Image (tube, grey):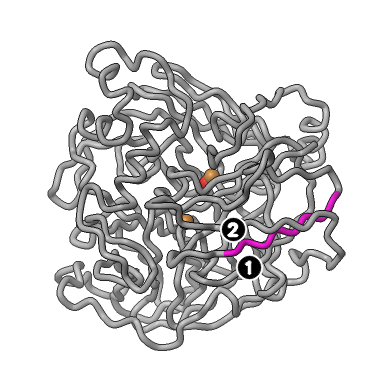
């Protein structure tokens, strides 16, 4: 059976009264934030290596977007690629028809086409946006979206975003090679006819590519402590820059600096630290948590953390080492009174990131984002399993992959990980509490190998929503289901 469920998607009408009512309840403040993004093939300079890739705006990371809570974003997306695309607003409890998850919430944006995303942002915090078509987010089609809170009391003098990414080299460096690798079915169309027929997402071809990736089809495959697999990433980037040519963060000595860290990697959890500095974690996936001090923290795929530090005089490496195997991303934070590091690349001197390591299970939500405890109206149990070389859902029967709910209900979903891999599980349209973590609020949680973990949320955002593993290859191979309002 098809792991994504047997029934064809039902398109959401933008005039659905329930969706419009949910949008009205977000309380637009009257301000509009217009943005124009064009997805196109671009040559990007990665520290002296020139690669052809797909981008919004010509860099290996899309422009950082900023808005204030309850602003309305008006984002026009133009598709100058030869293939379909979409844009998803990760972590935003958005109106359903603007969620950018084709084919569930919209038709894909075809080559030469455009789409206007028009929505109110209800929650402050560090979020991000990325293509939700196949493996495109791996090619540079992602960026940070910061929703500022006018009532923020954290007292930061400087606020900087750090987007972490694992840069796939094995897919090839020409647009044709990328197209061929990502979607053989449409690569012919690219060669001169602008794309041809638009296939649905998760075509058999996509899935066979994803299976090849999962099983190491374009590089060596090494299971490492059950964490992840190595498929040949020569580079890890921060804000689209490699270690030898970083985008340096600067501030005055003694400044309070807020770093907003986004892990946009396809399949890499990072261990993050700033040399010489203690970090205070103040938000997880944009939601405030009890300030918690640490030296290092692990950031799973698609997760975000906001940390505060007080900058000491000097130039200090910021390091994100790849959890469970070799590799690192790095940049530098420097006080205004300090000289630049002679060689910004820490190169052969990657520190062992020891010291206090914070687990996400130790974080606790602040009261204002805590979900009141209440008995669940629906209690689902889903298995995350390995079937051959694919990681998929273990739900069976006619409702496989469909988790139904009614507006106003409390939903509990227990995820059982029967594999040796991490699965960073993500809900669209909703944020959840993790009861085992004191009700920590977030939108993406790591379900560790051989464990089970429950999430709870209120069904308060009508529509049909994706719920999936944010390891890009697991997602593409079928570890995805829908949350459906009935
Ligand atoms: Cu980052 Cu389906 O999401
Ligand atoms: Cu997974």
Instruction: Kindly identify which residue carries mark 1.
Output: 453
Q: Main secondary structure of the magenta part?
A: strand
| Along the viewing direction, whichever of 155 and 394 lies nearer the viewer | 394
- For the image, the number of numbered tags is 2
Quadrant of the drawing holding the N terminus: top right
Tell me the residue at 55%/52% (across/down).
127
Quarter location, residue 98:
top right
Tell me the residue at 54%/64% (across/down).
417
Picture coordinates of residue 41 (x, y %)? 28, 30
Q: Residues within 10 Å of mark 1 (few under 14, many from 20)?
A: some
Q: Which of pointers 1 and 2 indicates the residue nearer the eye?
A: 2
**Callout 1–callout 2 Cβ contact below 8 Å:** no
What's the mark number on residue 383? 2
Magenta stretch contains residue 412:
yes
Quadrant of the drawing holding the C terminus: top right
Quarter location, residue 222:
bottom left
| Along the viewing direction, whichever of 355 and 69 lies nearer the viewer | 355
- Which residues are the magenta region? 409-416
């Amino acid at each position: 059976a098809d792991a994504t469920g047997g029934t064809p998607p039902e398109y959401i009408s933008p005039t659905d009264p329930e969706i419009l009512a949910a949008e009205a309840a977000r309380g637009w403040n009257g301000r509009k934030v217009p943005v124009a993004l064009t997805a196109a093939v671009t040559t990007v300079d990665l520290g002296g290596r020139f690669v052809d890739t797909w981008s919004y705006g010509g860099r290996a990371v899309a422009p950082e977007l900023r808005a204030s809570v309850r602003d309305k974003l008006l984002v026009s997306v133009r598709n100058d690629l030869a293939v379909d695309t979409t844009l998803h607003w990760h972590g935003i409890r958005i109106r359903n028809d603007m969620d950018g998850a084709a084919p569930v919430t919209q038709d894909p944006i075809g080559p030469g086409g455009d789409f206007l995303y028009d929505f109110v942002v209800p929650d402050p915090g560090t979020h991000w946006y990325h293509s939700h078509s196949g493996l495109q987010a791996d090619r540079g089609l992602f960026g940070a979206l910061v929703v500022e809170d006018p009532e923020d009391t954290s007292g930061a003098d400087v606020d900087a975003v750090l987007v972490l990414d694992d840069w796939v080299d094995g897919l090839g460096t020409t647009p044709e090679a990328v197209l061929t690798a990502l979607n053989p079915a449409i690569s012919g169309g690219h060669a001169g006819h602008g794309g041809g027929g638009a296939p649905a997402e998760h075509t058999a071809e996509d899935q066979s590519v994803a299976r090849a990736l999962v099983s190491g089809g374009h590089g060596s495959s090494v299971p490492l402590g059950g964490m992840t697999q190595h498929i040949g990433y020569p580079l890890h980037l921060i804000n689209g820059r490699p270690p030898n040519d970083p985008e340096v963060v600067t501030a005055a000595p003694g400044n309070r600096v807020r770093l907003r860290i986004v892990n946009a990697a396809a399949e890499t959890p990072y261990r993050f630290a700033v040399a010489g500095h203690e970090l205070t974690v103040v938000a997880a996936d944009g939601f405030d948590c009890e300030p918690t001090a640490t030296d290092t923290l692990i950031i799973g795929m698609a997760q975000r953390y906001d940390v505060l530090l007080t900058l000491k005089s000097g130039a200090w490496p910021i390091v994100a080492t790849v959890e469970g195997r070799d590799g690192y991303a790095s940049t530098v934070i420097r006080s205004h009174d300090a000289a630049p590091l002679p060689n910004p690349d820490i190169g052969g001197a990657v520190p062992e990131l020891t010291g206090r390591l914070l687990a996400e299970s130790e974080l606790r939500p602040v009261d204002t984002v805590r979900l009141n405890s209440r008995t669940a109206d629906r209690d689902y149990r889903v298995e995350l399993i390995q079937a051959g070389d694919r990681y998929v859902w273990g739900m069976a029967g006619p409702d496989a992959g469909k988790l139904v709910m009614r507006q106003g209900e409390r939903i509990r979903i227990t995820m059982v990980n029967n594999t040796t891999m991490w699965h960073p599980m993500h809900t669209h349209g909703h944020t959840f509490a993790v009861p085992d973590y004191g009700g920590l609020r977030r939108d993406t949680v790591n379900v560790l190998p051989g464990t089970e973990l429950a999430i709870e949320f209120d069904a308060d955002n009508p529509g049909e929503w994706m719920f999936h593993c944010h390891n890009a290859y697991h997602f593409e191979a079928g570890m995805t289901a829908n949350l459906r309002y009935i």
